[in-house]
Image: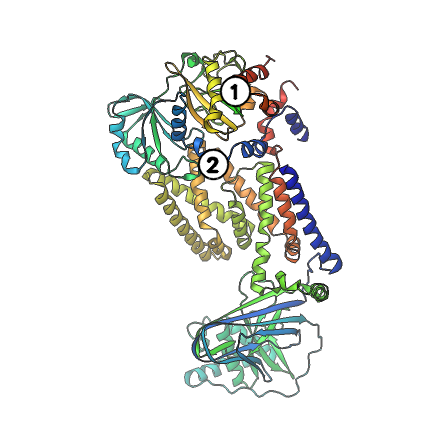
Amino acid sequence: MFALANTLKERGVLGLNQRNAEYTLWHNPRHLYPLVDDKLTTKRLAEHAGLAVPQLYGTIEIQRQVRTLPELLQPYEDFVIKPAQGSGGDGIVVITGRRKARYRKVSGQLISQEALDHHVANILSGLYSLGGHPDKALIEYRVKFDPIFESISFQGVPDVRIIVFLGVPVMAMVRLPTKMSDGKANLHQGAIGVGIDLATGKTLSGVWNNEIVIEHPDTEHPVQGVQIPWWDLLLNIAARSYELTGLGYQGVDMVLDRDQGPLILELNARPGLNIQIANQAGLYPRLKLVEQCHSELSGLEARLAFAKERFHCPPT
Amino acid sequence: MSKRHLYVLVTMLCALSLGAFAYKTLILKFPLIAETQASLWDIEVHISFHAKNKPVKVSLFLPKNTRRYAIVDENFISHGFGLSTLKDNQNRQAIWSKRRAKGKQSLYYRGTVHRIEVTEPPADKSAPQSETSTLTGAKLEAAKAVLNEIVDRSADTSSLVSELTGRLRRPDRDQNLLLLLGKKSTAEKTLHVAAEILALARIPARIVHGVRLQSHSGQPQFVHWLQVFDGGLWKSYDPETGNPKLPDDYFTWWRGAEPVTELTGGSGLDMTVSIAPNQEEAIEAAMLQSQFAAPKFLEFSLFALPLDKQAVYRVLLMVPLGAFLLLILRNVIGIKTFGTFMPILIALAFRETQLLWGIILFSLVVALGLSMRFYLEHLKLLLVPRLAAILIIVVLLMAILSIISHKLGLERGLSVALFPMVILTMTIERMCIVWEERGAQESIQQGLGSLTVAVLTYVAMTLPHVEHLLFVFPELLLLLLAGTLLLGRYSGFRLLELRRFKALAQDSG
């Protein structure tokens, strides 16, 4: 047991206690949390800074507004409804089309207007929000993901997460939905996490349920060695989100849209640690390195160059 | 920088805690281990009532020295009332009086009794006058009939009393006894009837009231028994068994038919009795000594509190220990629980219900509540009404469980009422949401995790030696605080994380 702990420590694996005690508690001032805990705030912040986000169709903030939902949805064939303060992807409904009076979910299942209303009411009452606070429901553009992911994801939208420390991208992964994860991009629900080489934007091996995989279990296409398109732009957006929020340690979640390119989905002040499993590498040495060299890095370009140079992954 | 600050603080706390602890053990000689056999007991009576701005008089029977117990110390807190004590050959009585009093009044009596071993009962030379029977009419005839029957079946006074109490305990078919006992017979009433019948036979008898000297979890109840004058001395009869031998811990309080306390000139008379084992001569001695070494010291110790408050603090001081254990289980081991402190509250409830019953009742309420919650899911209720509905269901479930277990004769089941219902409600709601979103396995896993943590904290919080240590040396809590602060900066792996990151340790190893 201690041997295992020592091995993990040697490899620089960051544990939950260490992440909290040495990174989030130090580098993420509490008063900045509301900027990322509410997706609506994040969206406005990003738009203001000129970063692309999925277009907002409308919000529903009070129970009474739920009645106007059909009218609000009228112009759109497909859309996404999500809680503004949700966590871990809970409470997100993706509608891909309509069939008579019903909506078609991404799984192909049909859902009635009444059921959709109830779902929105649940979001408003805080069912999916952190701490059960009353929440808002956002209705936004449904991302049509880049064809590159067509062969290596099941139903849902794959997203790219980059951990940014003091403005320097330190680790990245792409999360691929599977049948098991029910189209959701959450690792603990059965999605595949695939590490990305920061220097090139090429995928490394993947992890599925704590096992290393090189093929997508549903499509049987290789997940390794895939070049993520728009990689430099993705890194650029991630690094800029440090100035956006001021949070020293954050996870930037982005999606790649077929037409619009990278869009920021959300920012996370307490990003999970599974990214280490996907990359087969510990975060700690990279964070230490950034801490040491941080004072010498002035400007966005210097930070990006630093990340690409230092966090290049030699194929093992 | 801040780490050094933390270490300095922790060192100071440890030094303070251990210093006070060492001073109390080494110099004042406070006992480290609780004595198992208590020979000293503290008895405290708290009388409260509302005075109505007119002359008030309160009487209270006081315990007096008996063959088995001696009162070694007693005092009264009278709050401006005049106090006199009366003594006759049967009882001692305290009378508090005041010309004019208004509002809520509180009076205290506190005594310390010592168990003494007297083998030779003192012979009571003067045979007491037997009371004349007060029965008349039909009751008198009934009593005579009963007496005749039992006299026929007994050889001496002792067997007569055994026969009488035996019959009084089971008056099922005897019309005479039923007439005498009336519709609602209580233990006390039964003894009255027994005394009346014995008076008819010219055997002197009296009712004695007392308490059991043992650690009570709630309010100690008065017990009543019969004393019969036989062969030159008073013999006690256990009303439960009819044996002329009482349990060892019966402590005589007063004799006769009057209630223990009476009030004139006020209303709302309430009396609470608390009994606790005294912290032994060792602490008494230590306290005497500390009065010389540190005169102010005693005034600020927990022993200066009233007894019932002391009992509260005995429990409260264990809560930090539970919190510390919870901290280790969550942050070092990595067990997931519903709600941060929920397991501690459940563990506190377990103290009253006992472990096995606690687990059964908790699982029952949560399981039933959860099934009701799943039903509510279909109604599509908004959050707050839904929570209120679950709370109502939880209270109903608790009431139903109490009634069922009472009917089945399982008195422990009644203690389900002690569960914190709001915490149960939140647990049910959270479990249900996790169930829907992350699946049954995750939900049950977290539920079992919470229960395991609750059981472990319960075990830690009920260790008698630890309870004694924390109560006598509350400064040890500073040590816990220091440990908690240190763990607040613990940045190592959680035990269960090792399993999660195992894949990272394997490959190139």
Provide the residue designation for mark 2.
A31
Q: Amino acid at mark 1?
A: Gly
Foreground disc of the pair 2, 1: 1
Screen quadrant of the N terminus of chain B: top right
Query: Which residue is rendered at x = 48% and y = 14% of the image?
Result: A232
Screen quadrant of the C terminus of chain B: top right
Label 1 element class: loop
In terms of sequence position, does the residue under pointer 2 or pointer 1 come before the other?
Answer: 2
- Left or right of residue A192: residue A117: left
Q: Nearer the viewer, residue B110 or A73?
A: A73
Query: Which residue is rendered at x = 67% and y = 43% of the image?
Result: B8
Is residue B154 visible to the viewer in this orientation of the structure? Answer: no
Pointers 2 and 1 within a single chain: yes
Disc 2/disc 1 C-alpha distance (Å)? 25 Å
Q: Amino acid at mark 2?
A: His
Residue A165 x %, y %: 54, 25
Q: How is the image coloured?
A: rainbow
Marker disc for residue A299: 1
- Left or right of residue A193: residue B314: right
Q: Is residue B208 above or below residue A42?
A: below
Q: Nearer the viewer, residue B129 or B292?
A: B292
